Amino acid sequence: DGGITQSPKYLFRKEGQNVTLSCEQNLNHDAMYWYRQDPGQGLRLIYYSQIVNDFQKGDIAEGYSVSREKKESFPLTVTSAQKNPTAFYLCASSTDRASTDTQYFGPGTRLTVL
Amino acid sequence: ILNVEQSPQSLHVQEGDSTNFTCSFPSSNFYALHWYRWETAKSPEALFVMTLNGDEKKKGRISATLNTKEGYSYLYIKGSQPEDSATYLCAAGLGGTSYGKLTFGQGTILTVHP
């Protein structure tokens, strides 16, 4: 089955630790995205990537880093510099990075900082 | 940052009622308007992508309209069923430097009571 997988589903982190969230897709999509959701707010874009080895900051990139070494994978690292990391994180992909392209989402990872 | 607003924030209806909600967005530099349905414990699922003023899309009992000149879209659900209970997200895609990025509204939470 084609789709997007994210792991783990739940993640707990101590303050001061970096943590990496996994996102893998087998849809052969070029573009991939990371969003963050907080209660009462819309999805906010953290980083996006159009092709391998290329990525751009979204609206709230501070305290996060990404890599795109393979087309299928777009991991997100939440660093200790992120002041309020507890949130729900969604990964998405689309055929191309166009405003008209449908984005397909993974099931999400809920990160809690203890 | 483009502001996308959805109303109402939440809605409770009885099974069989028809309902509608609104997504508003700045009309300048507009490229596309996306609607997604996000059921609890699942991934957001694409419903419609609309690009042209006056566009109307339909999928079963759900339909949507688009007015790009005044910057709004309506989502209609006819004869609501309990399985329609979900958060409905809209997202606007712009051109220019924002091309390829979607800006999401905060969502409308629909609960359909049997």
Image: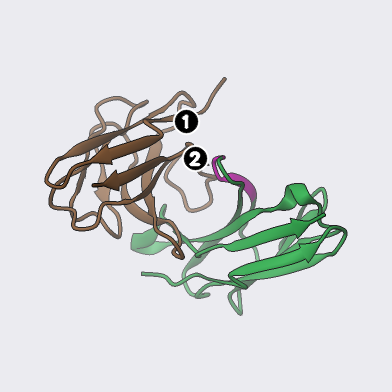
**Highlighted range, magenta:** B42-47
Chain letter of disc 1 in the image: A
Report the residue at 39% width, 58% height from top.
A38
Which residue is labeled 1 in the image?
Answer: A4
Label count reads 2
Residue A74 tag number: none
Q: Secondary structure at mark 2?
A: strand
The answer to which quarter of the image holds residue B89 is bottom right
Q: Residue furthest bottom?
A: B70
Q: Residues within 10 Å of mark 2 (few under 14, many from 20)?
A: many
Q: Is residue B95 above or below residue B6?
A: above
The alpha-carbon separation of the residues under discs 1 and 2 comes to: 7 Å
* x and y, in percent, of residue B85 in the image: 70, 53
Report the residue at 50% width, 75% height from top.
B26
What tint does the image give chain A? brown
Which residue is labeled 2 in the image?
Answer: A105
Q: Is residue B95 above or below residue B71?
A: above
Amino acid of disc 1: Ile
Q: Is residue A93 left or right of residue B60?
A: left
Using the rendered image, report if marks 1 and 2 lie on a common chain: yes
The answer to which quarter of the image holds residue A110 is top left
What tint does the image give chain B? green
Q: Is residue B83 left or right of residue A83?
A: right
